[in-house]
Every structure is written in structure tokens, then in C-alpha cells.
Image (cartoon, helix red, strand yellow):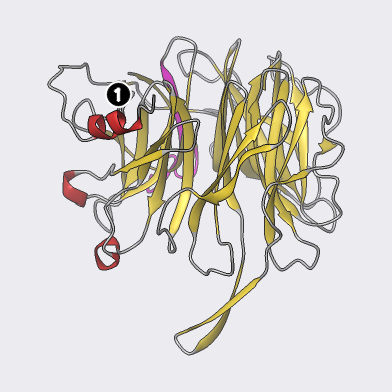
Amino acid sequence: MNLFPYLLIALFLNASLVMAQPQVGGGRLVTPDVTVEAQRQAQIAYGTDGYFVVWEGGLGGHSSIRAARLGQDGVSMDPSGLTLTNAPGGQFEPAVAWGHEHYMVVYSDLSSDDLSVMGILLDSKGVVQGDPFNLSTIPATSRMPAVAASSDGFIVAWAQAEPTDHGFYLAARRFSSDGQAMDSQPLPLTEMSAWSAGEDFEHKVTALADTQNIRIAIKDDLAVILWQGTSKREQGVHINRVFLSLTTGQEIFPADNAIPDAHSRIWHPEICVLGQHFLFVWTDYRDRGNLGLDDSNAGIMSDTGDAVFFSIAEDGGARKVVWPAVSSNGLMVFASTESDSHHPLLVRSLTENATSTGPDIEIGDEGAWPTMVMGSDSNSLLVYTRINSEEHNGLLTARIIIP
């Protein structure tokens, strides 16, 4: 029985249930002993001893991969932070997953001539286990990795340069719990890209078919991979998806556009498992009215690929939703371009059918790149980079949110 018609109805019905609003804890610095550091692009995993936060940090004149452990209460256990990599050339775009008593941290590495995707295994205390290892093994640029834990190991996906360096395709590889490759070669999940050219204000522009901001969610044996990019010689940016069997490494549903008619300015996808479905959100910069499209910037997707789209804008679109983040307890956080000078972070609580349980809660800080993950107690840890702050500008702040 296909439940999606009933889910579609539920999305647009306002339930009369009285539900508790989320409680947002006070903000704490992830590295309270650090006063100056450009802390960007944080990602979080939840392990047996609490949370593990990784980020791209500016130390020693170039970017390195930094980390810190946070307790269940969001208090930092590493007030000065941990440096996971600090090789010449710089390291960027980290991601992290917990599974099989290890954290797996992946990142883009520029210590050689081309960007490579590297991985590190750490124990529950954040201690590095062995040397970093190359995940892509393809002698061409690879970048922007994502990682998730499966029942028997990890899966990593990244943007892989095609042979002529005219674009990127999506590649993935499965790894065992001890970091050994289960696939002899990376799996190409999309076709190799090609040039796309056009005219813009009488200047010739060349748009490379691209792959960025990759995200992975896992439910049972199914991995859903989202990313933003161009394809099929189109210049617009949209959200794409692919369904992958973790057992066989085969695509169940080949890559396609997750968002219909999305051919311009669609960015920053995030995805999580919410109940029996996948919740995914994105930043949408399109002038949707001129396109005649619904004001949607979120969706609920089944494991058969059916999707229902809806809006997470507030007050009829008075606020612009950017950098949304979600966790599996139905919490969502996003930055709002309320005005040119004020960009608050807001928290929303959703039911399993993605219906809001009440008005949004303003956190009180302005932030960029928010990210969130649920812990074992159903609370979530939110981490974001403070902006427009005289005292803590550019530093990571953490808050515990109780749904």
C-alpha cells in the first residue's frame, strides 16, 4: 500500500495537538581556550562518550582539520581543540561518522599537486588510530567528501574530477570497520561531466558541470546520497540524488534530480532519517514567483523514491531560509536573512509528517554553517560559526536542544 498520498494530505493539515516547544540551551564555545581561529564547515557525530565535532580551522598560516569532544551537556572536553591534520598545503571540507567503536573523519587534502580525499580513524577518545589513508586512489582531483556509518563499515562519497578536468562526477566507496576498502575501485555513481557555456552580461562564461555539498543518510541497507550540482550541460544548480545498496554497492535508483524544475540557484542540501522516511532541506535562491513554482525548500522522501515537497519559509516567506540543518528527532535550525544587517538562527520542531509543532524559536545569535545531530537521549547538539560578533566572531558555538 502506497502511503504517500496520505502523507501528502498530512503535510498540509494543521493538527490541533498541543505539543511542547523545543528548549534551547545556552551557547558554549567549542574551544573556550581559543580566542582567534577561523572555524568553518563544522560537522558532528555522536559516539559512546558524547559528541565529536570536526571543522576546517585556520592555524599556522593554512587550513587544517581540527576537532573537539563535547559531553552530553555540550561542554567541551578539549578546550584548546585537537589538531587531526596539519600537513603542508592545507586540508579542507571535513566530515565525520561514528560506527564500530571508531570515528571516521574524511577531508580534502592539498599536500600534493591535486586535491585528494583522505581518511583517518579515531577511537572514542579522539585518539588517531594509524596514519591517514587515501580513499579515492584515482590520480585526479577529488574533493568535498561525505561519510556515514553502515551496519558493517562506512560509506564515503565525494566529487571526482573526470579525466580532462572539465567537471566532476559523484564517486563512492565502501570501507570496512577498520578502514579497509571493500570496493577495489571507487564506484562512479553519475556520468562524467562535460562543458557547459553561455553568455552573461555580454561576457563569455563557462560553467563546469559540478558536484558539491554531498550528504548521506542511511536507513537499513539503503544509502541516499544528495548533492548540489549541474548536469546534462545545464548551467543552473539543483539538488540531485542517488539510492545505493550498501550490501551490493549497486544503484537501486540511478542518479536524477531530486527537485523537479530546479534549474537555478539551489544550494546546501541536508538530509536525515525521520521516522520511516527521509527529510531533506535546501537553500533556494530562485525567484520562484516568476517561475510559477510552489514555494518549497524541503521534502519528505520514501525509500522507493517518492517525494512530497513543502515550504519551510516563515510568515508567508517574509524570512529567507538559508543553511538549514536537520536531525532525526524532527528538529530543524536555519539562518534567516531577516534583513540586510540581521541574520538570526531559528529553531523549528517538526512532526514525523514534517508539520511544524509551533512558532519558530530565535536563538539570539547570528551564525553560519549550522549543523546538528541527535544523541542517544533524543536531544540534539547544534554547532555553528558565530558571525557579526565582536567577542567570538569566527568561533564555533554549541548548544543542546531538547525537542
Q: Is residue 96 left or right of residue 382?
A: right
Query: Considering the image in quadrants, where does the N terminus appear?
Result: top left
Q: Is residue 113 magenta?
A: no
Q: Amino acid at mark 1?
A: Thr
Of residues 244 and 318, the one nearer the viewer is: 244
What is the residue that sits farthest to the front in this orientation?
1
Assess disc 1: are there few (<14), some (14-19) or many (≥20) residues with their C-alpha within 10 Å of its C-alpha: some
In the rendered image, residue 184, in percent from the top left (x then y), is placed at: 87, 37
Q: Is residue 377 visible?
A: yes
Residue visible at 40% across and 50% down in the picture: 283
In the rendered image, residue 203, in percent from the top left (x then y), is placed at: 52, 87
Residue 98 placement: quadrant: top right
In the rendered image, residue 185, in percent from the top left (x then y), is placed at: 84, 42
Residue visible at 45% across and 44% down in the picture: 393
Q: Which residue is mark 1?
A: 351
Residue 390 placement: quadrant: top left
Query: Considering the image in quadrants, where does the C terminus appear?
Result: top left
Of residues 228 and 263, the one nearer the viewer is: 263
